[in-house]
């Protein structure tokens, strides 16, 4: 067992990805995105035999990456917001520009996940659903999971309106994650996912938050809130090596 994992949270020091990258990719190419010219610039992917990212749609759909299957026929790039695998040298990537990238590493079963958690995915419990897929496919236990929370819009800047708060009307975390300052609401997406992970049984010391800068006020990151349609996407990846 090699017990090594390679995690990368990208900032604007590297080239960002176009949010609509999937329009330029044929379904046949999806089984190995490492051939995309943009990804060739990412030296941290140089050991990757294959690279996967989904067409992200703020869902809770999880894709399981198995051994390479050349015969797979697809009519379109798969839509999903989490990827899991136990295959070495397969990079799983999620793109973000304020949403939270979450990486899971199960060192016991040598399995990983990459999750795109915007507020919709977060409150629909994509963190929990992705864990359940890893549990089912690889036997992952919450007590074994190592979690890496990446850069995202944080509660200092993530302003929301009254209508947004209604989305969490019956949510048990509502009062902890929706903060009112001077009459204005802010949402704490990072804390929301942290609370989900704690409730799943992931130990506190296994949830690493030190990578999680605020993408809105920290100009080292692409941010949809700050840059609007000029924002490219931060490329965040995890790979077993
Ligand atoms: Zn901030």
Image (tube, rainbow, N blue to C red):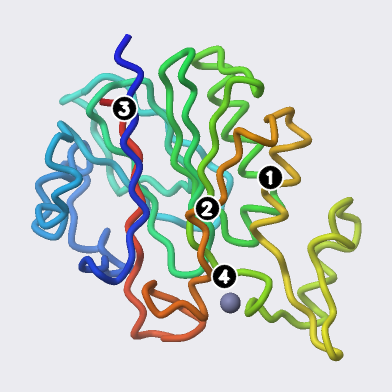
Mark 4 crowdedness (10 Å alpha carbons): few <14, some 14-19, many ≥20: many
Q: Which residue is mark 2?
A: 210
Sequence-first tag of 4 and 1 = 1
| Residue in the foreground of this view, choosing between 132 and 110 | 110
Disc 4 element:
loop
| Of 33 and 237, the residue lying toward us | 237
Which numbered mark, 4 or 2, is in the foreground of this view? 2
Q: Nearer the viewer, mark 3 or mark 1?
A: 3
User: Mark 1 packing: few (<14 Cα in 10 Å), some, or many (20+)?
Assistant: some
- Which mark is first along the chain, 4 or 3? 4
- Establish if 149 lies above or below 180: above
Secondary structure at numbered mark 3: strand
Real-space CA distance between mark 4 and mark 1, rounded to the nearest whole angstrom? 18 Å
Which quadrant of the view contains residue 238?
A: top left
Residue denoted by label 3: 240
| Residue 168, percent from left and from top | 83, 62
- CB within 8 Å, label 3 to label 1: no
What's the CA distance linking mark 3 and mark 2?
A: 21 Å
The CA span between labels 2 and 1 is 22 Å
Q: What residue is shown with label 1? A: 125
Query: Badge 2: how crowded within 10 Å, few (<14), some, or many (20+)?
Result: few
Q: Position of residue 102 (x, y in %)?
A: 51, 46
Q: Quadrant of the N terminus?
A: top left
Horizontal side of residue 135 vs 21, given as left or right: right
Estimate the x, y position of residue 213 in percent, counting from the top left.
51, 65
Q: Determine the CA span between mark 3 and mark 4.
A: 27 Å
Quickly name the residue at label 4. 153
Kindly identify the residue that appears in the image at 32 percent across and 57 percent down: 235
Say whether residue 234 is left or right of residue 102.
left
């Amino acid at each position: 067992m090699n017990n090594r994992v390679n995690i990368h949270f990208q900032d604007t020091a590297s080239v960002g990805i176009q949010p609509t990258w999937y329009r330029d990719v044929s379904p046949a190419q999806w089984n190995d995105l490492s051939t995309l010219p943009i990804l060739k610039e990412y030296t941290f992917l140089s050991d990757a035999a294959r690279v996967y990212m989904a067409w992200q749609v703020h869902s809770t759909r999880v894709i399981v990456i198995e051994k390479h299957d050349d015969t797979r026929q697809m009519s379109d790039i798969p839509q999903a917001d989490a990827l899991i695998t136990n295959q070495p040298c397969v990079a799983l990537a999620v793109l973000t520009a304020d949403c939270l990238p979450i990486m899971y590493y199960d060192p016991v079963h040598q399995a990983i996940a990459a999750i795109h958690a915007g507020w919709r995915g977060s409150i629909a419990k994509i963190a929990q659903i992705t864990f359940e897929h890893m549990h089912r496919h690889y036997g992952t236990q919450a007590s074994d999971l190592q979690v890496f929370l990446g850069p995202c819009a944080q509660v200092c800047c993530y302003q929301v309106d009254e209508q947004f708060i209604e989305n969490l009307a019956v949510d048990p975390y509502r009062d902890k994650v929706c903060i009112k300052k001077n009459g204005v609401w802010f949402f704490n997406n990072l804390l929301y996912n942290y609370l989900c992970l704690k409730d799943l049984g992931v130990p506190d010391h296994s949830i690493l938050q030190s990578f999680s800068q605020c993408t809105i006020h920290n100009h080292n990151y692409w941010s949809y809130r700050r840059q609007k349609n000029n924002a490219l996407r931060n490329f965040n990846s995890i790979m077993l090596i």
